[in-house]
Amino acid sequence: MRQSSDQGADIYQDSFQATGRTAEDSSAAGFDFRILGPLEVTAGRERVAIGGRRQRTVLATLLLTPDRVASVDRLVEAVWGGNHPTTSRTQIAICVSSLRKAFKAAGYPGEVIETAPPGYMLIAEDHRIDAVRFSRRAESAQRLAQQGRTAEAADLLAEALGLWRGPALSGISSNTVETEATLLEEQRCGAYEQYAALQLELGRHREIVPELSALVQERPLREHARAALMLAQYRSGRRSEALELFRNAREVFVGELGLEPGRVLQDLHSAILREDPELAPDMALSTSPITIVPRAGSSMATLPPDLSTFVGREEELETLNGLLERPSRDRSPAVGLVVGRPGVGKTTLAAYWARLVEGAFPDGQLFARLRENGSDDADPVPAVVTRFLRTLGFIEEEIPDDLAERVALFHRSVENRRMLIVLDDVQDGWVRALIPPKGACSVLMTSREVLSIPTLVRLRLKPLRPTEAVALLDRLVGDGRVSENPGVAVRVAALCDHLPLALAAAAARLTAKPHWSLSHLESRLRDPLNRLEELSRGKPEIRAVFDLSYRELSPAAAAMYRRIGLLNGSETDGPDLDVRLGATLLDTDPTDAENLMEQLVDAALLEVAGEEPNGRFRYRLPRLLALHARECASLSKTG
């Protein structure tokens, strides 16, 4: 919208930059510092690797007070609390030096962190800090609201809240940082309360019910948020729920504070009881279309929140960008599929790409994991469609009981929206109902198995490259044990088959055992009889993930999997297998053996190693899967 004053133009130029889409932003030489969620630093599209826990804590502390000096004592307190070593001041200097080297290596020629007695100062010039941009937009929105420019104020607050990717500085373990992060969270809640009030003023009560419900559940003592939700529910025809929300407030306030709810809630409760006409929305505005602006940490932004450890995958991300290149005349959704063996990182890749391209989908993103907690017993489509419709603003009375009607309503609701729908861990029989037959949206699916659905983009995800696997392990452990032992790290990553899930399990073992060296973990993983057990203690549990895919095999394919596992060695991937050997293993003919081995390929439990002159294929069972197959054989009477 063109503004009539220079002030308005400045505000909207500033707010547009928040989306990262302006020419000025895209060409800027500085860094993007993100603290409204996990700490993240990027230069353009490239992530800047920040070292271990101490460096991240120091950087987080400096980012909380940009252009202001943070004393060495404050940094020491942030890193160690009251129990700091005698070398703490020297170690802080080392951390700052390492950060400076990281910024130089990322291509920035200037000084990001200056020495400024009695400490250090982060220079914000040339850089973008999301917390600063959030505060400026929230302040500008407040001025617009005071001028009566309600819709513009709401849009600007939506952009400000859209900068949040999760709890501020999540993953930084420091009392100092956590205290500051709590203050940022209070600002977020206050901004959302103002946003909800503006949306109510605009008659958009249905749209805000899901997010307000999540905020009240998260912060039950915030009276203004609860009052806004009560009013939104009442205006949406959910009077009984609004009254129940007040009764619940009374229980919470009396139980936790020993006080009755405040005057705002009590007056609103009385007005709802007598159905005060002043509570009705402006009917001229209540017909405005639903607008979905998902925000990380809200009920609408259900993408996995912590993607701060993502590494590599540049080629794969570029392949997924093909979903953005659909011809404008094409009225069918752009559909993409990522398949790969268990633990290879399909969900993380899909979620990370969705975050990168969120600006290309102005009407929002929907995410659903179709096989929660490994359950394959029930068809998840009814529950997923219902949840999507609630997210889109429909109340229970508007959602049909009949599944076909419910699916049709969902299709109509997204038909004209530029949305991204991410469907994680799907099966062929389930997913078709969740793909709209036409419209402007895009759909990205992940699956453990090859699907027969037509796709614009199809990607078979492979394990990480060795250097990426080591980088991921280092980032997950974060205390120097990996970077200080590069040779051992390469071997540990190989023992994990370079699988992100296995690397996460190995990192979890090291985190739980701070007295273990990386070499000690390597010695434990080298034992093939202990490797899966070592990677299945705590979370994530690699064996359980493999079990999910194994249980879905037909009996004959499962038998083939077990028999191949008995052939494989423990220190390398197993030998290449041809269909003749497969036929011998099950005493069947080559065609039947090839069909069973192809079933294992489709289930991502066997890899194609090459093609023979006769047109038949050679196959290979990767090392961790071979150990799992051997375990399954030992537990099977027919193994």
Image (cartoon, grey):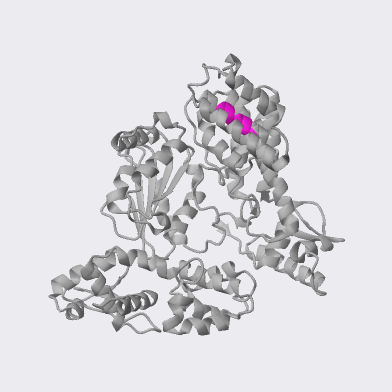
Q: Position of residue 620 (x, y in %)?
A: 30, 76
**Which residue lies at the image location 52% right of the left edge and 42% below the top edge?**
299
Left or right of 486: which side holds 253?
right
Q: Quadrant of residue 461?
A: bottom left
Q: In this orientation, which residue lies closer to the viewer: 603 or 483?
A: 603
Stretch in magenta: 225-232
**Farthest-out residue, right:** 118
- Quadrant of the rendering where the N terminus is positioned: top right
**Farthest-out residue, left:** 589
Q: Position of residue 625 (x, y in %)?
A: 36, 74
On whether residue 447 falls in the magenta region, the answer is: no
Left or right of 63: which side holds 34?
left
The correct choice, above or below, for 403 with respect to 619 in the image is above
**Which residue lies at the image location 24% right of the left edge and 74% below the top edge?**
560
Q: In this orientation, which residue lies closer to the viewer: 122 or 542?
A: 542
**Which residue lies at the image location 78% right of the left edge and 64% below the top edge?**
81
Q: Position of residue 186 (x, y in %)?
A: 69, 43
On whether residue 228 falls in the magenta region, the answer is: yes
Q: Quadrant of residue 418?
A: top left
Looking at the magenta stretch, what is its main secondary structure? helix
Q: In this orientation, which residue lies closer to the viewer: 34 or 20?
A: 34
